[in-house]
Amino acid sequence: MTEMSKEEMVKEAVEEAKAKAAEEAKEETSSGNDEAAPTEESAEASAENKTAEENTEATADAGEDAADSEPKEEKKKFFGKKNKKDKKDEKIEELTDRLTRQMAEFDNFRKRTEKEKSQMYEIGAKDIIEKILPVVDNFERGLASMPQEEKATPFAEGMEKIYKQLMTTLESIGVKPIEAVGKEFDPDFHNAVMHVEDEELGENIIAEEFQKGYTYRDSVVRHSMVKVAN
């Protein structure tokens, strides 16, 4: 009875030891599962964080690309077409326009001055020629009134040479006598002081010249004084 009780006690102790060992093993397994679960959650959280970081980096890259593209577009727009001129360019254009106007005004002034100078010279020359013409008239009257027998004398020859030299000088500066006798009357060149009826002459034909007229560079210095027929 007593020995049997010992065997039962040993068996019961063995069973208790096994049960305790199994319980400890179960607890270790549970604790292992509990520790593994946070590890998986951490892995998932890390994956999510990595994905978020990648998305953030992609967004930042896109922002940088957009930021890079905007200056390019603005730069292209700036060099392609200027909306407003630079003040320095406007000043240059203003000064260039002013210089062009002044050069045009100076050119007009120069031309006007040359024209006025030419007119003044022509007026002065005509005034001098007009004063010389009476001397020419006197030479012509003196030579015309000289008797034929005296025209061969040295005095008459000298007077003839002086007259020819004077007329050559006047002609060289542009003074020319106006044709009158036998020409049609022209009020621009002739001054009619007498009329005569002559059937042999046509209408408004100059029959006689009383005073010779002259022109200077196609401008009348003195009109011819004439007698007009019919």
Image (tube, rainbow, N blue to C red):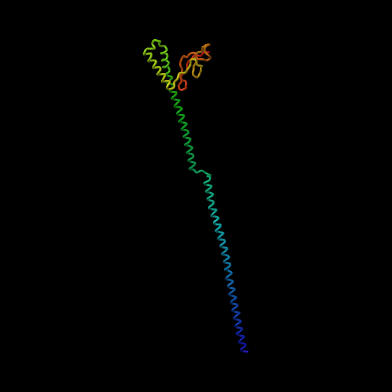
Residue 43, by quadrant, is bottom right
Residue 33, by quadrant, is bottom right
Q: 135 or 157, which lies in front?
A: 157
Q: Position of residue 149 (x, y in %)?
A: 39, 10
Q: Position of residue 106 (x, y in %)?
A: 46, 33
| View extreme (bottom): residue | 1
When the figure is inspected, residue 98 is found, relative to residue 20, above or below; the finding is above
Q: Where is residue 98 in the image (x, y as percent from the top left)?
A: 48, 37
Q: Is residue 174 left or right of residue 41?
A: left
| View extreme (left): residue | 154
Q: In which quarter of the image is the N terminus?
A: bottom right
Disc tally is: 0
Residue 7, by quadrant, is bottom right
Q: Position of residue 156 (x, y in %)?
A: 38, 13
When the figure is inspected, residue 41 is found, relative to residue 137, above or below; the finding is below
Q: 31 or 151, which lies in front?
A: 151
| View extreme (front): residue | 152
Q: Is residue 189 left or right of residue 48?
A: left
When the figure is inspected, residue 190 is found, relative to residue 91, above or below; the finding is above
